[in-house]
Amino acid sequence: MRCARGAGRGVEVAGCVAPAVLLALLPKCPMCLAAYVALWTGIGLSTPAAGQVRAVLMVVCAASVLWLGARCVKWVRAIRRESRARSRA
C-alpha cells in the first residue's frame, strides 16, 4: 500500500502546483492568448473572447490557489493541535 500512498501524494502536489503555474504562465494580453489557443487547438478566438477567457482562467486559478492555501492552513492547525495534545498527555 506504500506505492498507492506515494502516488496519492504526487497527485496532491501536482494539484497544488498546477493552478499556480498556469496562473504564472497565463499570457498577459488577450491577443497572445488568442494566438496560443489558435496554435495549440486550431480554434480561432477574437480578442474580446480571448480577454474573457483569460479573465475566467485567472479567477479559477486564483480561487483554486486560495482554496488549496486554506486547506493547507487547516491541515497545519490540525497537526499542531495533535502535537500539543500529545505533549500534554
Image: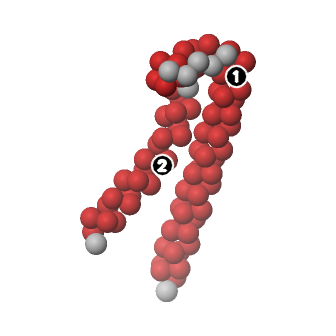
* 10 sits to left or right of 21: left
Which residue sits at x=56%, y=32%?
23
Residue 73 visible to the viewer: no
Report the Cα–Cα distance between label 2 and label 1: 27 Å
Which residue sits at x=44%, y=54%?
12
Q: Nearer the viewer, mark 2 or mark 1?
A: 1
- Specify the quadrant of the image occupied by residue 1: bottom left
User: Which secondary structure lies at badge 2?
Assistant: helix
Residue type pointed to by label 2: Gly
Residue type pointed to by label 1: Ala
- Residue 55 position (above or below residue 76): above
Q: Position of residue 75 (x, y in %)?
A: 54, 63
* 9 sits to left or right of 53: left
The residue under label 2 is 15
The residue under label 1 is 49
- Specify the quadrant of the image occupied by residue 62: top right
Q: Earlier along the polypeptide chain: callout 2 or callout 1?
A: 2
Q: Name the residue nearer the viewer: 88 or 43.
A: 43
Q: Position of residue 49 (x, y in %)?
A: 70, 22
Which residue sits at x=47%, y=18%?
39
Label 1 CA crowd tier, 10 Å (few <14, some 14–19, many 20+): some
Q: Name the residue nearer the viewer: 56 or 21.
A: 56
- Residue 69 position (above or below residue 86): above
Residue 20 visible to the viewer: yes
Are the residues at dot 2 and dot 1 in contact (C-beta closer than 8 Å)? no
Q: Position of residue 47 (x, y in %)?
A: 68, 15
Label 2 CA crowd tier, 10 Å (few <14, some 14–19, many 20+): some
